[in-house]
Amino acid sequence: MLKLQVRDQLMMRNKIKQILWLLCCLPVLTGCIGEDDYANDPRGNFEQLWKIIDEQYCFLDTKGIDWDAVHDEYSRLIIPSMSNDDLFDILSQMLYILKDGHVNLSSASRISYYDAWYQGYPWNYREDILYNYYLGSANSGYRTSAGLKYKIFDNNIGYIRYESFSAGVGDGNLDEVLYYLQICNGLIIDVRDNGGGNLTNSSRIAARFTDKLALTGYIQHKTGPGHNDFSEMEPIYLEPSNSIRWQKKVVILTNRRCYSATNDFVNIMRSLNNDNEDKRIIQLGDQTGGGSGLPFSSELPNGWSVRFSASPHFDKYGKSLEDGIKPDVYVNMDKILEEGIEQGDIESQKKDPLIEKAFEILSE
């Protein structure tokens, strides 16, 4: 009973601290933008956008970006007579320098976004192979509960496919899935190509894989306009679910298109491993795409919306998660399939190397 009381007090203090920091930072996040009145013209919109990023974006120093130099470079491109399309292009190019998938500029007809966090990397996922040779059809191959697709393979390995953290998942759904999979010797959680969504779903699912309160990371909040004006690191804890939990081995499949809430989920799951023991939860595939800054939105004088990372997130060791999380076991599916084609191995084109490697790990 004493442990429960201590745990509850710790959780409550953590939640209260986070709420207080958010309340303290609210004037910073909302008030700084209105300090100066910028004109609704190309120059005014440029200066407003530059200032928003300068004072509120959380990774300028982390990424080694000289934002003053960026101002000088792009300021020369702003002319009074430029069209809205030309202005949108220039502002978008300036934002690309941040190399952040959480940064967007949106008008009524256009939206800019940075996608190099996954472009140019091995895809490590083939939907046709997954469904044709592993899952089958929804009618006879796999089951579905809300946003979760799940199945028991012939080798008694369980499998869960979650395609988007925007897809709602309730406790009843998780009970249904884990109850069905409880006979399995191991579990694969496939979040490849999951670009993120709701952080609540991330922690709700992860809570089924721990039986004790767990430190999963830290978060900071902007406290002023300076590039290094941050609060102290505030700890983030995961409380275990009081319903069905999984304590056997897990392999999480990832690729570069795992971003934002998916990056958060992978970090939480990895944090549940004990430092002095063999890993119970293993990440397999490729590095995630990152995206650890909690996004915030603001508005330019012309009504365009800008979204940006405002609060940095770290793992339980204090390491930034912005650039993604490297896997415990790296597998290059694209390369393996290409080698199979070169060797004339037709059967190799019917196999998902990440799933096959997960089978191997979970059968040890």
Image: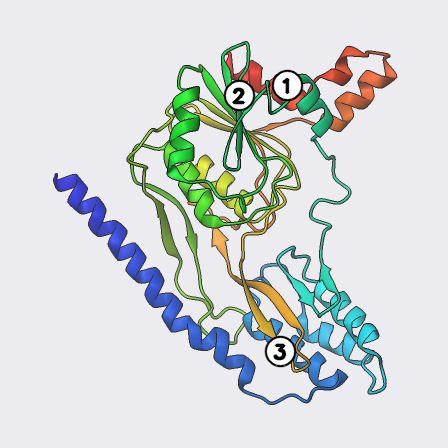
Report crowding for label 3: few under 14, some 14 to 19, many 20 or more residues within 10 A (C-alpha): some
| Distance between the alpha carbons at the discs numbered 1 and 3 | 51 Å
Q: Which residue is mark 3?
A: 51
Q: Are marks 1 and 2 in contact (CB under 8 Å)?
A: yes
For image coordinates 78% across by 22% down, the residue present is 337
| Sequence-earlier tag: 1 or 3 | 3
Is residue 274 something one can see in this rendering? no
**For residue 62, which quarter of the picture?**
bottom right
Which element carries disc 1, helix, strand or loop?
helix
| Sequence-earlier tag: 2 or 3 | 3
x and y, in percent, of residue 14 in the image:
30, 55
Q: Are marks 1 and 3 in contact (CB under 8 Å)?
A: no
> The residue under label 1 is which amino acid type?
Tyr
x and y, in percent, of residue 191 in the image:
58, 35
For image coordinates 75% across by 45% down, the residue present is 119
Camera-side residue: 298 or 271?
Answer: 298
Report crowding for label 2: few under 14, some 14 to 19, many 20 or more residues within 10 A (C-alpha): many
Relative to 340, residue 207 above or below:
below
Q: Which residue is mark 2?
A: 151
Which element carries disc 2, helix, strand or loop?
strand
Q: Are marks 2 and 3 in contact (CB under 8 Å)?
A: no
**For residue 101, which quarter of the picture?**
bottom right
For image coordinates 16% across by 45% down, the residue present is 5
**For residue 278, which quarter of the picture?**
top left
